[in-house]
Image: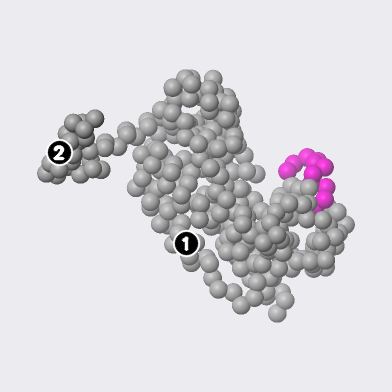
Amino acid sequence: MLRRALVLLSLLAAPGLSPAAAQEAPPMPARVVSMNLCTDQLAMLLAAPGQLVSVSKLARDPMSSAMATEAMAYPVNHGQAEEVWLMQPDLVVVGSYTAQAAAQMLERLGTPVLRVEPAYALADVPARIRTLGAAMGRQAQAEALITAFETRLAALREEVARRPSAALYYANGYTTGDQTLAGEILLAAGFENIAGARGGGQLPLEALAMAAPEALITARPYPGASRSEEVLMHPVVRRLRAAHASTANTGNDWICGTPFVLRAIEDLAAFRKDIETETE
């Protein structure tokens, strides 16, 4: 063991050979498959031509994906280990909670799998880009994307004289507090979240009515009927929309920790300015 260490040290001390160079970087994976909506979009932003060979079926869903049009250029997978293995990928990218049975099967078959945590805050976005960029051998592209993201985010975080109150209100009467990606989008756009530090969970209609937010921000309803979304049509919510609140919708830019959250902030900031103009 000591002899091996001394040999390694002598090699590192050789002219022109640094520790970074001594540890040769792994080759860029030639065939990458993504099995998660959020990693789909990051992979599409980072991949070299021909490197990304498949994305999940949700990548083409315009209700969920901010890159639904771009995803039409890629074959889709349905999160099944068998279909992904037959694509002979050098790297499979999954979320940390989705498609875990398939991911474990692929690992047992010898396929490298990268699990990427969801972004819980705006600060997580650069970290997720950097993680995937390194795994795909696209570090330079990742750093360029991060620089552009952070520069634009700083420009969008403008000082506001007054923060209009707002409620994030979803199916089943669910809301989110400040310590979430949606909550941070709301704050960055210049609103005050009525849930604030209390965190997420169900917000009773009575509490929503008493708070009387100036802006009500809800999700777009999915096609068809859903009992979970019936609360969004409740007379209390309709009355708030008519009497107290302007209404905006969250959309596919809000779902994942990608650079598209900047578009959500930009749209919401414009919505806030409209509210301020109406109340002057």
Depth check, mark 2 against mark 1: the one in front is 2
**Horizontally, is 232 left or right of 277 in the view?**
right
Residue 10, disc: 2
* Residue drawn at (71%, 50%) of the image: 220
* Residue drawn at (59%, 34%) of the image: 98
Q: Which amino acid type is shown beneath numbered disc 2? A: Ser
Observer able to see residue 83: no
List x then y, in percent, for residue 143: 38, 51
Instruction: Decide which of 211, 152 is in the foreground and name it.
Output: 211
| Numbered disc 1: secondary structure | helix
Q: Which amino acid type is shown beneath numbered disc 1? A: Arg
* Residue drawn at (61%, 54%) of the image: 180
Observer able to see residue 7: yes
Say which label, 2 or 1, has the lower sequence index: 2
Q: Is residue 85 magenta?
A: no
Query: Quadrant location of the N terminus?
Result: top left
**The image quarter in which residue 97 lies:** top right
**Horizontally, is 193 left or right of 126 in the view?**
right
**The image quarter in which residue 200 lies:** bottom right
Residue 46, disc: none
**The image quarter in which residue 139 lies:** top left
**Horizontally, is 9 left or right of 260 in the view?**
left
Cα separation, mark 2 vs mark 1, equals 46 Å
The stretch of residues the image draws in magenta is 222-232
